[in-house]
Amino acid sequence: MQILCEGNITEKLFTRYNQLLAQHGNHKWWPADTPFEVALGAILTQATSWRNVEKAMDNLKDAGAFTPEEIASISQSALERLIRPSRYFRMKARKVRAFVDHIADRPMHVMFTQDVPELREELLSIYGVGPETADTIILYAAGKPSFVVDSYTYRLFSRLGWVTGRYNYDKLRALFMDNLPHDVDLFNEYHALIVSHGARVCHKNTPNCQECRLQTSCAYYQSSG
Ligand code: SF4
């Protein structure tokens, strides 16, 4: 993946941020009440929609299996059954179990005393925690500045003409980490805005460019007009 954006990238990133904010307003993410709930959602949302995650979460709540201790006390087959709506439920049940096992020895509040690089390294060492999940936990559960990127981020910034080539998580994340102040509120809102824009406006197959406030600075729009 190549970064094509040149010049004052920081200023350009803030301009896009303000355009997205004007379009979608503030989000105040992540939709969860506890750090563990953030981590659980981050694992369950891998390769599925948030709607499916909510169904799985509701099942866990209804079954009284919503805390690490409660999840540790149920069988693997029961866990699989409860999170079935989130798809890939057998693999995800193993991932949730691995995370619960890890925090039984290393509680989240203990892990969260580390700086971002060390915390990220520890999270990535847990089965089932990839870069996007790790950064989500760091940003939204630990409240530390680690920018989260995803397929929405890639789609938007490739259409804007900022990146090209095969999606590379670390390179795309570095675009934000290297050019924005490491501010938790900014990272939190920026990622949420990108997700909203991808879900509501810059759709995968037919982007709704007429409704988009980034239109004048979008390479895709300019080339299709
Ligand atoms: S103008 Fe269209 S393609 Fe470009 S960011 Fe907006 S919705 Fe996406």
Image (cartoon, rainbow, N blue to C red):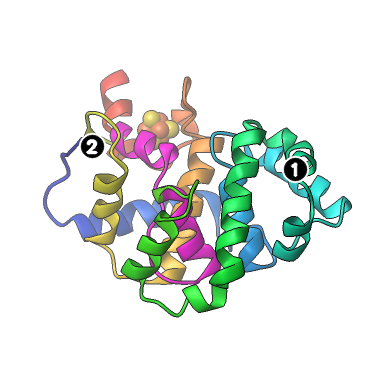
**Amino acid carrying mark 2 in the image:** Val
Q: Which residue is mark 1?
A: 56
Q: Position of residue 94 (x, y in %)?
A: 61, 43
N-term mark: 1 or 2: 1
Could you say which quadrant of the image residue 176 lies in? bottom left
- Picture residue at 54% right of the left edge, 34% below the top: 47
Q: Is residue 134 in the magenta section?
A: yes
Q: Is residue 201 left or right of residue 60?
A: left
Could you say which quadrant of the image residue 72 lies in? bottom right
Q: Which residue is mark 2?
A: 163
Question: Foreground residue, 178 or 169?
Answer: 169
Q: Is residue 148 in the magenta section?
A: yes
- Picture residue at 54% right of the left edge, 50% below the top: 24
The picture quadrant for ligand 1 comes to top left
Q: Position of residue 48 (x, y in %)?
A: 59, 34
Q: Is residue 6 left or right of residue 147?
A: left
- Badge 1: residue crowd in 10 Å (few <14, some 14–19, many ≥20): many
Marks 1 and 2 in Cβ contact (< 8 Å): no
**Is any part of residue 9 visible from this angle?**
yes
Q: Quadrant of the C terminus?
A: top left
Question: Foreground residue, 220 or 144?
Answer: 144
